[in-house]
């Protein structure tokens, strides 16, 4: 009997071919049986209770937020392999952040289990695909680079989908699960399992799932730590003792709380902006209630997007003050160019033509959109200065630290971005793709055009006595 070709969708087989595969598996089932019982039973013996409850939760959607070294990868591998062994012709999918990380994390673990339990299979390196003799497939892939990556997952019906390192996925994780994967498990009554550790940002879709904020669909949430993993718990206890002996305050660091305690703690050193509520939140004062007349000059910054939000930030300053104030800001997804033009015009009307410059991100298609605004709507818009962004972020941070930037009440969305936007790596060259930065960018464009630095304090009057 011919084996299914790697990469062939099982749903493309005829009913006759499916019956042949099932009959082949039935007749050769003895190859999967040992004196200790069937393989699908034996491979479960390595799981501890928390892993088992997560993998075999009766719910369609389940998540697990764990510490490091909690046995997440092993639990995922066992779940994938059990689904493949126990269900002939099944399709299982493992999704890592990238294809390379999926290969490095999951391929060795699955290969070790296949070898341990002597399960006949073939591995197709180019496709990162394991094909068992019963016609089941386990595929490894990555889908964390961009929303375009997820389109390749369409067209296949899955019995089990595992998403690993979910805390590092960008904003499209929600789209990946709800808009793409959910329908792929409907035909086979499959399950989706999402697993990860607390990240350096206490926000995002995985954070919402793990903490119960996400309520649009029911999620069965699980939590466990390295203490449940008896294979390594004693070694980690010894490591913690050595760390505490060398530095007793290590237990108060964000990294320790995330990795060893499983807590969502932001690391202040990794934040892009040095915002402080005590230093940069302007108090509500009566003379600023009318925002249109509170300042002498205004600049409007616009960061364009469609699926990503379009963001607007208005900043103002006095000719007699060295400070710059974020007056109002907001962001919306799905705006088309004509709607954005109307919002820009409404700002100019609201601020009585005191907006001296409108700065727009003209990257990508933004240049043609801005030119249409100039010709069709007679809007005077200026391209945002996007060069040396990293250097200007440093300058902005200096303004935050000195208290030069003041944020008026009503800018909660901006404050949330400032508190959660972190660097992707230690080089501090790229912002983390899982964090929203749209209002921050529009603020950056507008503050860059402010002239509050031209303020000169009045000279002191000479002392007549001296």
Image: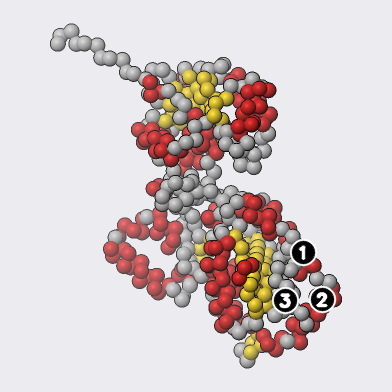
- Name the residue: 74% across, 78% down: 3
Residue 11: % across, % down: 78, 67
Residue 142's place in the image compared with 450, above or below, is: below
Specify the label residue 187 is tagged with.
Answer: 1
Q: CA distance from mark 3 to mark 1?
A: 18 Å
Of residues 351 and 263, the one drawn nearer to the viewer in this rendering: 351
**Secondary element at image label 1:** loop
Specify the label residue 135 is tagged with.
Answer: 3
On the question of residue 174 being in view, the answer is: no
- The answer to whether 368 appears left or right of 410 in the picture is right
- Name the residue: 56% across, 19% down: 351
Instruction: Provide the residue designation for mark 2.
Output: 17
Q: CA distance from mark 2 to mark 3?
A: 11 Å
Badge 2 density bin: few <14, some 14–19, many ≥20, Cα 10 Å: some
Residue 263: % across, % down: 46, 57
Quadrant position of residue 347: top right
Residue 22: % across, % down: 78, 79
């Amino acid at each position: 009997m011919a084996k299914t070709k790697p990469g062939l969708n099982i749903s493309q087989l005829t009913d006759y071919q499916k019956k042949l595969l099932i009959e082949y598996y039935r007749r050769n089932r003895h190859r999967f049986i040992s004196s200790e019982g069937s393989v699908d039973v034996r491979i479960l013996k390595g799981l501890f209770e928390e892993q088992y409850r997560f993998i075999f939760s009766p719910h369609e959607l389940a998540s697990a937020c764990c510490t490091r070294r909690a046995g997440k990868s092993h639990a995922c591998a066992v779940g994938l392999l059990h689904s493949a062994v126990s269900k002939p012709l099944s399709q299982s999918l493992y999704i890592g952040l990238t294809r390379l990380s999926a290969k490095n994390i999951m391929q060795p673990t699955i290969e070790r289990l296949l070898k341990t339990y002597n399960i006949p299979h073939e591995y197709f390196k180019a496709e990162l695909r394991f094909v068992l003799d019963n016609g089941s497939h386990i595929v490894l892939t990555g889908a964390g680079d961009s929303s375009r990556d997820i389109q390749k997952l369409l067209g296949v019906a899955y019995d089990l989908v595992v998403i690993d390192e979910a805390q590092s996925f960008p904003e499209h994780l929600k789209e990946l699960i709800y808009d793409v994967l959910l329908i792929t498990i409907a035909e086979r009554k499959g399950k989706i399992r999402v697993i990860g550790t607390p990240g350096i940002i206490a926000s995002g879709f995985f954070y919402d799932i793990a903490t119960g904020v996400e309520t649009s669909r029911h999620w069965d949430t699980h939590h466990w730590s390295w203490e449940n993993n008896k294979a390594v718990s004693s070694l980690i206890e010894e490591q913690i003792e050595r760390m505490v002996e060398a530095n007793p305050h290590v237990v108060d660091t964000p990294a320790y709380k995330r990795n060893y305690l499983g807590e969502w703690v932001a690391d202040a050193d990794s934040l892009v902006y040095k915002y402080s509520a005590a230093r940069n939140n302007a108090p509500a004062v009566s003379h600023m209630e009318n925002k249109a007349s509170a300042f002498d000059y205004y600049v409007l910054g616009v960061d364009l997007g469609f699926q990503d939000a379009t963001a607007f930030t208005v900043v103002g300053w006095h000719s007699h003050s060295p400070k710059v104030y974020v007056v109002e800001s907001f962001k919306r997804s799905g705006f088309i160019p004509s709607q954005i033009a109307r919002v820009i015009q409404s700002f100019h009307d609201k601020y009585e033509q005191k907006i001296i410059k409108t700065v727009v991100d003209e990257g990508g298609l933004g240049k043609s959109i801005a030119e249409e605004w100039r010709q069709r709507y007679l809007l005077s818009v200026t391209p945002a200065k996007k060069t040396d962004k990293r250097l200007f972020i440093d300058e902005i941070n200096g303004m935050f630290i000195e208290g030069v930037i003041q944020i008026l009440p009503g800018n909660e969305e901006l404050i949330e971005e400032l508190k959660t936007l972190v660097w992707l790596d230690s080089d501090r060259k790229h912002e983390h793709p899982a964090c929203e930065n749209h209002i921050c960018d529009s603020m950056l464009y507008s503050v860059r055009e402010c002239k509050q630095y031209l303020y000169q304090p009045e000279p002191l009057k000479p002392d007549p006595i001296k």
